[in-house]
Amino acid sequence: MKTCVVLGDLLSDLSSDNYPTVPVCDDCFAESSDSENTILSGDFDTLFGNNCYYCGKSKQEEENEQS
């Protein structure tokens, strides 16, 4: 899981809605990195949540799949 800045609601007046910083699971990151939806990515940080922004998978579920 990674923490990413992604394209959000560009019509919103809030910059936090335009480019939210959200957790993204490895599967969704692989899919979204091929498109232009992911602006920046970094190490996972629980400050931004524990569930994937796209599919809702939790950090724990992802770790269980990898073991």
Image (tube, rainbow, N blue to C red):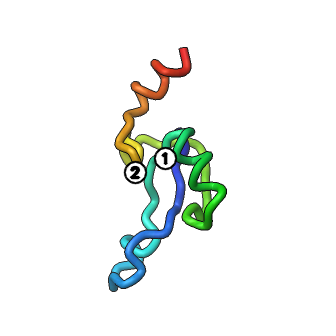
- Amino acid carrying mark 2 in the image: Tyr
Is residue 47 in sight in this rendering?
no
Q: Residue 24 carries which label?
A: 1
- Amino acid carrying mark 1 in the image: Val
The single residue placed furthest to the top in the displayed view is 67
Q: Position of residue 27 (x, y in %)?
A: 55, 40
Q: Where is residue 51 in the image (x, y as percent from the top left)?
A: 37, 41
Identify the residue at horizontal 34%, vertical 79% (top origin). Answer: 14
Cα separation between marks 1 and 2: 6 Å
Identify the residue at horizontal 53%, vertical 55% (top origin). Answer: 4
Q: Which mark is residue 53?
A: 2
Compare residues 36 and 60 and report the one nearer the observer: 36
Q: Position of residue 32 (x, y in %)?
A: 57, 55
Please tell me how crowded label 1 is: few (under 14), some (14-19), or many (20+) other residues with Cα within 10 Å.
Answer: many
Q: Compared with residue 17, is residue 33 higher up or lower down, i.e. above or below?
A: above
Q: Compared with residue 38, is residue 10 higher up or lower down, i.e. above or below?
A: below
Identify the residue at horizontal 43%, vertical 65% (top origin). Answer: 20
Image-quadrant location for residue 58: top left
Q: Position of residue 35 (x, y in %)?
A: 62, 62
Compare residues 27 and 40 and report the one nearer the observer: 27
The answer to which of marks 1 and 2 sits earlier in the sequence is 1
Q: In this view, does 55 lie to the left or right of 27?
A: left
User: Is label 1 in contact with label 2 (beta carbons under 8 Å)?
Assistant: yes
